[in-house]
Amino acid sequence: MIILCVIPVRGGSKGVPRKNIRPVAGKPLVVWTIEQALSASGLDVLVSTDDPEIADVAREAGADVPFLRPAELAQDTTATEPVVRHAIDFRTAQGRRPEVVMLLQATSPVRFHGTLDRAVEQFERTAVDSLVGVVPQTPFLWTMGADGERPSAAYTVGRRPRRQDLGEQDYRYRETGSLYLTRTDIYEQFDNRLGGRIGLFVMDEGEGIDVDTELDLSIAEQQLSRFRKELEGGDRAR
């Protein structure tokens, strides 16, 4: 398959200003995702950004940044799908229309070694149309009623299970926002990263961090620092 890996990185972050190039565990945040994509097999790695400084950082890390994203696709209200469609159209105009798009979000920077290759393998093996990265959650979840007074649980309160007795079917699965694999025609038909036959790609709980706040950034720093030490330790052992 021809897989275009799109990493959308906007310059105008509000919650954590300039977060995509903030140093995290020794590297700009976006560089973690770029390096993960480049280490996977057979991905055409493209960074879509409106910001010249981010573009320079991405190029230095080895990503292709063939354009600066138009301003109308870099607003606070801009959805991700039009940004991906823009990248698809650009590659198609170059005569390199992808069959599949992998969407990686730089604000979910923790992905273990082999995760992206495992996702591609599952996508091909299961022949789904789209694959969404998720982390498992116990069913001990509640929703508040419309009147604010009648909450409901995602499990049977009268038969509360023990955590150690939970089976795979008992869990709920939360989108990490980290990783999506989608057939190009799904984007073209539905303008959505998910559609057709959808599969769940279960990631490790440690890969579920999404950076929206300074606290999230601190947690990502801890996770990635530990991850880097483990990798360096493995290199020394070899």
Image (tube, rainbow, N blue to C red):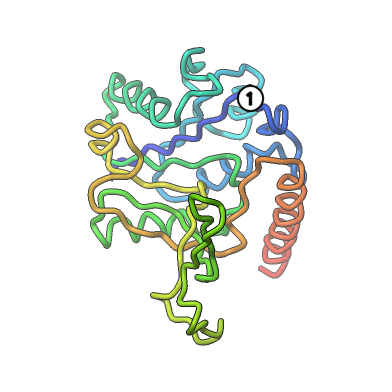
Q: Residues within 10 Å of mark 1 (few under 14, many from 20)?
A: many
Q: How many marks?
A: 1
The x and y percentages for residue 159 are: 48, 84
x%, y% of residue 88?
A: 33, 28
Viewer-nearest residue: 55 or 149 = 149
Indicate left or right for 77 with 85 as reference.
Answer: right
Q: Which residue is mark 1?
A: 54
Q: Residue at x 52, y 20 (%)?
A: 74
* Position of 40 relative to 91 (above/below): below
Vertically, is 182 above or below 53?
below
Establish if 11 lies above or below 15: above
Q: Residue 5 at x, y = what percent? A: 42, 39
Identify the residue shown where x is 37% and y is 37%.
4
Q: Amino acid at mark 1?
A: Ile
Left or right of 187 on screen, residue 23:
right
Drawn side of residue 158 relative to residue 219, left or right: left
- Where residue 230 appears, as percent x and y from the top left, is 70, 64
Quarter where residue 204 is shown = bottom right
Residue drawn where x is 33% and y is 44% of the image? 194
Q: Quadrant of the C terminus?
A: bottom right
> Residue 208 occupies which quadrant of the picture?
bottom right
Which residue appears farthest toward the top when viewing the image? Answer: 71
Query: Which is nearer the eye, 65 or 89?
Result: 89
Secondary structure beneath dot 1 equals helix
Q: Tell me which residue sits at (23%, 48%) in the image.
A: 196
